[in-house]
Image: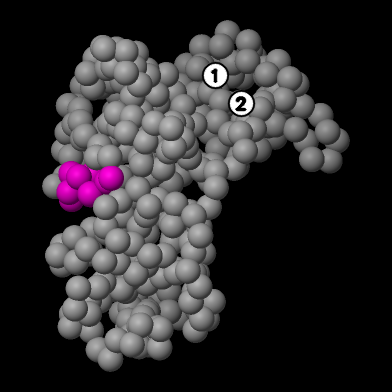
Amino acid sequence: MSGLADDPDRRSRLLALTLAALARDHFGVSSFDAATGLTRGAAGTAGDRAFVLVDDQPARGLGAALAWATRHDVDTVHLIASSATGLLARRAAQFRNRVTVWHRDDRALIEAVPEVFAEPSDVSPEHMAFESTIVEAGAHASIEHGVLAGEVRGLEVCRAVTDPHTGAHRLEVGVGEHDREAFGMLHGDTPTADSLRRIVRIVDAHRSPGADPHPLNRLGAERALRHRVLDDPSLIGVASLTSAPPPVVRANLKDPIPCVARGTNADGRDVIAVFSTGIDLDVVPFAADARLALCGGDHPDTDLVIVVPERDASPVTKRLSERLVHPARIVGIRHP
């Protein structure tokens, strides 16, 4: 496997051959009319059907598959993956394209069933006791999927945790799990409140408008964008806005993953806002999933706004947003 990872061309050829075999065995496709590579896997068309095999980060592969199919003027898509197929099926149902998601088990394909959302998790009272420490240090208290954390301009700087061995509850200071561990070893004798105030000052200085480039202002750019709009919701034409949890648990702080907020328009109607930076092909499926998670099936047409830096308001994002059953609007924000 490491040899394939080191040779992208060989990997691409192997995935294309695998997709051709699956299309032949399960859909009677003798050959593709057009077959080209896909960043996350392989894809090809046969008549009015597109076949897409997603191999790299399947959970984030729907947007790339739909963008590829749209570019080739194909509306019927067979999306094949070996994991996250329940999630993909749930998100695919939000689009007007005829998308069928298949779970691949070696050479076998099973049609995927849309996955239900996980039950909401409450923050334990022991962890909520740290909220005042976070706020008093100058950070913003954030709650997502049962986790209490402190953020500075969108960057997580502390998190309430429970020691898996002793059961003790504590507030760990640092940016990310490894940084929190290192910080604890280096500053274990410093009171948590003092340590947190110090790191809040450092991070705030690096993430303030006009600060010089630094790793601390490159991380979590989408959450920095959300922080800016939360301070001034009029930037996207809404009356009020508060942060909200994403539809799935965020795996880590290093990967750029969209973030979410909810609020009201000037006329009192609900609005869901999703924030992203860069050209993220999967932001539209993610945003539709966020709306579904927060509004349920009772309000599927709730106003959905995808917020990106002005330079990232790409035509492909607009095209995909228009393919939703209930389309979203794209708002580009100028750099301050």
Residue at which label 2 appears? 148
Depth check: 47 or 133 in front?
A: 47
Q: Is residue 169 left or right of residue 327?
A: right
The residue range painted magenta reads 316-325
Residue 34, located in which quarter of the rendered image? bottom left
Q: CA distance from mark 1 to mark 2?
A: 7 Å
Left or right, 64 with respect to 259, comes to left
The correct choice, above or below, for 154 with respect to 300 in the image is above
Residue at figure coordinates x 44%, y 52% from the top left: 90
From what the image shows, is residue 93 above or below residue 18? Answer: above
**Of callouts 1 and 2, which one flags the residue occurring earlier in the amino acid sequence?**
1
- The amino acid pointed to by label 1 is Ala
Picture coordinates of residue 89, whole percent (x, y) = 44, 57
Total count of labels: 2
Amino acid, disc 2: Leu
Q: Which dot marks residue 49?
A: none
Residue 318 located within the stretch drawn in magenta: yes
Helix, strand or loop status at disc 2: strand
Quick check: is 51 in the magenta stretch? no
Residue that numbered label 1 is attached to: 141
